[in-house]
Image: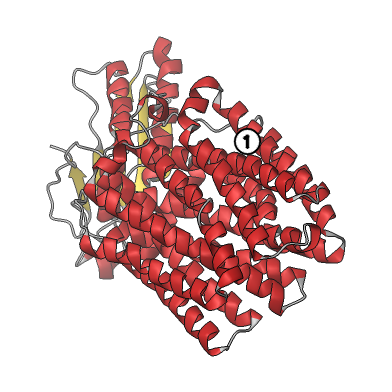
Amino acid sequence: MQIEDVSLTGPTTLDPLRNAAFRSIWSSTQVANVGWLVQTVAISWLMATITVSDLMVALVQASTTLPAFILSIIAGAIADTYSRRSVMITGLSLIALASIILAIAVGFGFVSPWLVLGLGFMAGCGFALNDPAWHASVGDILDKRDIPAAVTLISVGYNMTRSVGPALGGAILAFLGPLPAFLFAACSNLAPLTAVLRKKWHVRSSPLPAERISTAIHDGMRFTALSSDIRAAIIRATLFGLAVIAILALLPLVARDRLAGGPITYGILFAGFGTGACVAGMNNRALRKLIPQEWLMAIASVACVVCCISLAMTSSVTVATIALAIGGAGWVITWTGFDVWVQLASPRWVVGRTLSIYYAFLSGGMAAGSWIWGTVAQTYSLSSSLELAAAALLLVAASGFVLPVHLAAEGDQLGSEYPAPEVARALKPRSGPIAARTEYCIAENDLVTFLGHMRARRYALARAGARDWTLQRNLRKPSQWTETFRTPTWMDFLRLHHRLSPSDQEVVQLLSALHMGDTPPEPDLVIERTTDARRTRSQPIARISRP
């Protein structure tokens, strides 16, 4: 089922700012982003001055992105299971604490490469907790129609600060030294924490109790694995992150070695990247109207190729800045496309987990890319590393025609509005296993249509948690078909029913229309029981039918 692409027909980019909670968190996040970029410039340049290892310099990027690869899936399950606002507070607290400790360490002169990487890892853990919860909360704070504009606004806001933060960081480093830069970052990272503590928003509560974290992780991974388009987006995002991170990971070396510059040069280069990203982000919606999405993302990847090749060949600050503006534009167009699609394609019950899996893989790609390109630069040369990254980006651009990504969502974000089946026995949440069986009487000339609807039905049930799905045909009565599936417990069955979207329920109505019986097909529910005597005395065999 294809629905209208709301990323093209929705509100303007600035409309989500009318919401007070979103506006407060978004604006304070921009303050923190400026501080974080100032700190990133200071850390990268500090690392380039306290060590001669190109690999250690490149690992600054890896230290903050690796935790997202390790923790994001768990963080996504936590965000879908518990209060997303509380998860955001925890993550933002870790980021602020890491910045404060780093400022204190620099103030007292206790700075070493491993301390810098360790605190970067700590801040990365905070980002791993905060980012899935914040992006998933966008759908709680705003209407679905506002989500594409909000995701674009988040990306634009961050990249807009890239045109201010790096230049400011370079200026602070050049004129005041590293300590004021780290103090500024420590103070700015308190802004979003304060905003989230002050603002609350309504969240549509589930009528069911919270899942166990292990179960939530399993369900999220199963949903993502069975969603072919989300799978394609994750694969492409991982490959893109692995290749494109060379631009930022090697940028301090470009400023120091190829351009023979200092902190101000590095800040100017970073500002060029942010300016290009900001301009592209503000015009992103218009570009999608003019150019098909796959072609737009391919062009964006080629823009990053141009950036890498230019940085590998030029010794001019002006040329490098222009090249970085082109690369920044390609960066934001590609990431925004992936982010919007994953957000819209995911139901609310699992959006935190799908986003976290997406972030985990792209962060893992970035962390691996930082190590790979840093190793190549150290072993061979900086130019060789950038040229190989450009070649990898060309392959990524071509991958869109093999693994296409569609922005049109194939399901509804809200769960089922239909009441759960009533049963004749009182069941405990852990009662089970539960088996569901539905019989259909189908005419021979409707078989092709029936089997097509059943494929959609199986796909929907599997993503929602059904196990052992089968479709059986009666050999004595060929017109009689039986659909069966199982869930481990009664609570799992209730969760499955709650997760089915209105689009999934439409499939049930289409199947009912093909049924030749006098009454619509009704599911027959049974609870499986063992014949073991010790269990049957306290747990007799039961059969549950929907009245």
Q: Quadrant of the C terminus?
A: top left
Look at mark 1 in the image and give the residue it sits on: 300
Q: Secondary structure at mark 1?
A: helix
Question: Is 496 located above or below residue 108 in the figure?
Answer: above
Q: Residue at x 35, y 18 (%)?
A: 442
Q: Position of residue 415 (x, y in %)?
A: 27, 40
Asked if residue 416 lies left or right of residue 152, the reply is: left
Query: Which amino acid type corresponds to the residue marked 1 in the rendered image?
Result: Ala
The picture quadrant where one finds residue 306 is: top right
Q: Residue at x 51, y 30 (%)?
A: 406
Q: Position of residue 278 (x, y in %)?
A: 51, 42
The picture quadrant where one finds residue 364 is: bottom right
Task: Please state which of residues 402 and 201 is positioned toward the viewer in this rendering.
Answer: 201
Residue that protrudes farthest toward the right in the picture: 380
Q: Residue at x 13, y 52 (%)?
A: 425
Graded by Cα atoms within 10 Å as few (under 14), some (14 to 19) or many (20 or more), the crowding at tag 1 reads: many
Residue 67 in sight here: no
Q: Residue at x 62, y 54 (%)?
A: 268
Question: Is 35 located above or below residue 477 in the figure?
Answer: below
Task: Please state which of residues 247 and 200 is positioned toward the viewer in this rendering.
Answer: 247
